[in-house]
Amino acid sequence: MLIKKWAGKNYFVALFILLGIAALLVISVFVLTAFIPDPLGLNPVDYEMTSVSEFEPWTFEANGLKVNFPDGGIIATLNETGNSRSYLLVGSGIYEPDSRIPDNEKPGGIFIMVEDFYFEEIRGTNIFIPVEDVNTMNMLSAFTEKQIGVPPVWSETIPLLFHAHEGLFHYYFITTEGNPILPPHTQYTLWQLYGTFIIYIIFILITLLLITIFSLDHRYSRYWFHLGKTPPGIFSLLLIPLSLLLIILFTILTKLMGWNEMYSSAGYAIVIVLLIVLAGKGRIDYLDLGLRRDRFKHGYFMAIFTSILIIAAVRGLPQGICTDNIYAFLHLPVIFIVFGLPRELVWRGFIQAVISRQLNPTKGLIVMIILAAIARTVVIAITAPWMLTYPYTYLELAVLVPGLAAILGYLYLRTENILACALLHSLILWLPGIILY
């Protein structure tokens, strides 16, 4: 509205203003990334045991961590990435500070991620002797499968890792059975943390600006104006918290029970069926869930362009497309039907639409964004409460989740086509799996 006021009815002036703002934001991103190492995060890594060795009595100190293995122990290399490595140290040791170890837990080792050069310093003259004992190898293999390593954030969308780049990056203790004792300790600087937050906020603003540019001549349809003059009934409003409860419940159950991620969509399916049944009985009015025939042709180019922009911003420029597995290309319609469409029908087609009718489109968008962030926070607090002590979790909760909700909700406002939103949602989930970096 402010842009339109400045530009009057001249779309060229509005376009010039928006492009100027976008250019300034892009420049600010380049400036920040020049001073912050890996501000956008790294791709998740797979932890696989590559070597196992015994070591003699060993004492080392690194970044405030003191470890003493008076009887020696076993070291397993789990991952090598660039100039850093991840190790699993197993043995009867003395660990300081021990404030991170619960009173009812007896530590049996430690997982550490450390810079190669720094590791050679703390290793000193300690000799490593390769292990060939089958029982020891099997034990370490079982321990390896239990490790979380550096915890990813936004794991259900585009998983991202964040860690420091000097010295000991990350560590946590493990039990005698090899289970992680959480939360972990992660080394980071406030400049790195805040810089990452700022950069992602800027990327979200750039994306919203580009959607605005591509839909500069947008006008709300007569149908939308009609809905704005017919507030929803109290019954429709009460269905919003009930819908959120079902969505959160099935998401939590899926995680706690270790079910396939597809089961989390059962909550959305139940909500959609419930809404259709109630609408058929006349308890809900104007339930279209964003599926209107006259709007089906709108927004697909913006959805494709926006998905590519988001993936490029988070993962960087791709080196190619994985063509080895043709079935990966068949996953897109499955993701669309199982994840993208049901989520958009509920979040944008129902929740955002009902709140927009009660308040207005802008306030409806804002409230929907807040509800999405709250829902994700509840899921993490119940399924992985230790993640709330990990600083980058708040990047997901305060920026990434509400940011994606804002982009999807804004695209819905500009297109009034839920299928375009579902396509964008599906592409964001699908593209990281076929792009090579």
Image (cartoon, grey):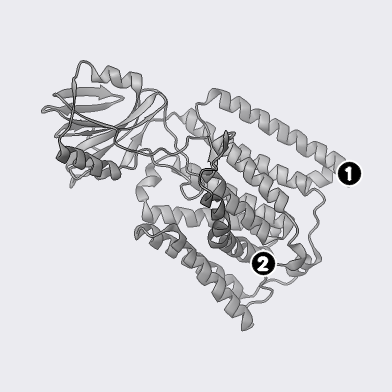
Front of the two marks 2 and 1: 1
User: Picture quarter containing residue 231?
Assistant: bottom right
Q: Could you say where residue 93 lies in the image, as x and y percent from the top left? A: 15, 32
Question: Residue at horizontal 38%, vertical 57%?
Answer: 255
**Whole-percent x and y of residue 8?**
87, 45
- Residue 248 visible, this orientation: no
Q: Nearer the viewer, residue 45 or 59?
A: 45
Q: Secondary structure at mark 2?
A: helix
Q: Residue drawn 46% across and 30% down?
A: 190
Secondary structure under tag 1 reads loop
Residue 198: mark in rendering: none
**Three-letter code, disc 2:** Gln
Q: CA distance from mark 2 to mark 1?
A: 32 Å
Residue 181 in sight:
yes
Amino acid on which disc 1 is placed: Asn
Count of numbered circles in the view: 2
Per the image, the residue denoted by label 1 is: 10
Q: On the image, numbered disc 2 is attached to which residue? A: 358
